[in-house]
Amino acid sequence: MEPIQQLKQWVEESNNIVFFGGAGVSTESGIPDFRSVDGLYHQKYDYPPETILSHSFYRAKPAEFYKFYKDKIACVQAKPNAAHLKLAEWEREGKLKAVITQNIDGLHTDAGSREVLEIHGSARRNYCERCHAFYGIDKIRESEGVPVCDVCGGPIKPDVVLYEEGLDQKLLEKAVNYIANADVLIVGGTSLVVYPAAGLIDYYRGNKLVLVNKTPTARDGLADLVVTGSIGEVFSAL
């Protein structure tokens, strides 16, 4: 059986699917990933993106951080693609239990998914570090230099997990629970090299682990089914 046909059959037969996705889910919506040929790591800045998007850099050079952040992350006006929309459809049909995502763009929510675990946070959420007032992404986009709170004048920080920062343990536990109890686990658009997030699939106990990616991943040998291709095209065929 062709891989897409096998995946389609598993989806049709299941009402306990969990999806775990990475940057590749959003690239088709026009959001650059980090490691591809035209991704953020291959663009020219005074510092590597991994350095700029670190906790220590944010503290030491907030103006430089926000220059990059506004230019490359907060600026994108993206729309959900076929993969986002299909996952939301499965949830409405009672087939999919949760979307676990490494992305911070909010596109799964835009597509209509309700149970979305954003383990790296969301660029849509921002807060004052002094008084904890909440701000949407427009506050970041419209600010000159470092955005400051309208209430107390404190610095505003994106509610995203920067390098050197830990993940939310309660959210991770919830993700582990969904994965451990899933019938079908579909992993899409991720190279599975960023830990601890990539280690989440180790908690899967079933026999329908599906990897969907344009290029091979380090975990292909462990998968029950590997579907090679653009995630939007693959999901459009399901």
Image (cartoon, rainbow, N blue to C red):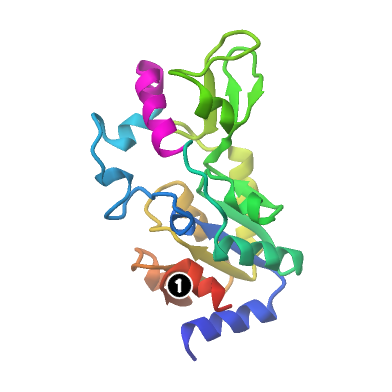
- SS class of the residue under badge 1? loop
Residue type marked 1: Ala
- The answer to whether 122 is drawn above or below residue 109 in the figure is above
The image position of residue 79, as x and y in percent, is 56, 53
Does any portion of residue 163 appear in the rendered image? no
Is residue 81 at least partly visible in the picture?
Answer: yes
Residue drawn at (55%, 44%) of the image = 119
Q: Quadrant of residue 19?
A: bottom right
Residue ID for mark 1: 223
Quarter of the rendering occupied by the C terminus: bottom right
x, y (%) of residue 161?
A: 49, 35
Q: Is 3 positioned to the left or the right of 173 in the image? A: left
In the depicted view, which residue is nearer to us: 30 or 50? 30
Judge the density around disc 1: few (<14), some (14-19), many (≥20) Cα neighbours within 10 Å: some
Answer left or right for 191 relative to 98.
Answer: left
Q: Would you say residue 63 sits in the magenta stretch?
A: yes
| Quadrant in which residue 18 is drawn | bottom right
Q: Is residue 40 above or below residue 66?
A: below
Residue found at x 27% / y 35%: 48
**Above or below, comparing residue 100 to residue 12 in the picture:** above
Q: Residue at x 61, y 51 (%)?
A: 175
Q: Main secondary structure of the magenta part?
A: helix
Q: Position of residue 67 (x, y in %)?
A: 38, 26
The stretch in magenta equals: 56-73
Q: Please check the rendered image and state whether residue 202 is part of the magenta-colored stretch, yes or no.
A: no
User: On screen, 79 above or below 76?
Assistant: below
